[in-house]
Amino acid sequence: MQLSDQNRKTLLTDLHRIIQEQTHHAIEKIFDSPLEDRSIYPPDVSKTAEEMQILAELPDNPNLRSALEKVFKDNTATVLFRFFSIIDRVGYPDPHSGTWAPITMVDLPEQHEQDIDLHDNFFETYWDWKEKYRDQNHKPVS
């Protein structure tokens, strides 16, 4: 079985909504509450007081908001595009990330229990990534 056209369209359409929504939230964080650090990623890094202060000093103007929205949306869409390219087997994970066998997305029967938690595993594997990808001085990336 493969992913149905309806599920594929629904998933991809909703990702565009999520990009829009999360970009809006990011812009609000910058301009409406820059001194609050409500970031969840990366899990081991918070904004410094100096970084939050410089965000607070950004001029709140429509052109800056618009430019940042475009940068954030493009970045998010690029991450998703590369992710889907790996699933579609036209792109491959970096060999340093681990071994890889092709995968696919399929429709599950309605009564099927979800047995993977990629949304949780994503944050858990941050520590694996940080250990594997060290800078040239063999220090973890930040």
Image: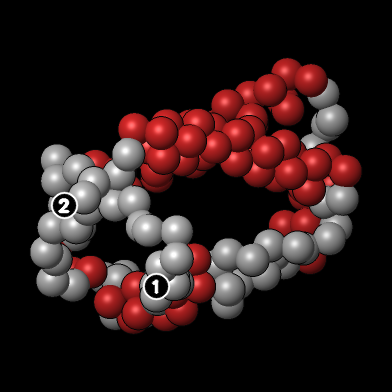
Tag nearer the camera, 2 or 1: 1
Q: CA distance from mark 2 to mark 1?
A: 21 Å
Q: Is residue 112 left or right of residue 50?
A: left
Near-viewer residue (11 or 22): 11
Residue at the (29%, 52%) spot, across then down: 106
Q: Amino acid at mark 2?
A: Tyr
Q: Is residue 58 left or right of residue 124?
A: right
- Disc 2 target residue: 92
Evaluate if marks 2 and 1 touch, with contact meaning CB atoms under 8 Å apart: no
Task: Tell me which label, 2 or 1, sits earlier in the chain.
Answer: 2
Q: Amino acid at mark 1?
A: Ile
Residue 29 position (above or below residue 77): below
Residue 75 seen by the camera: no
- Disc 1 target residue: 116
Residue at the (41%, 67%) spot, across then down: 112
Q: Position of residue 75 (x, y in %)?
A: 47, 38
Q: Position of residue 19 (x, y in %)?
A: 57, 38
Rendered image quadrant of residue 5 = top left
Residue 49 seen by the camera: yes
Q: Quick one: SS at disc 2?
A: loop
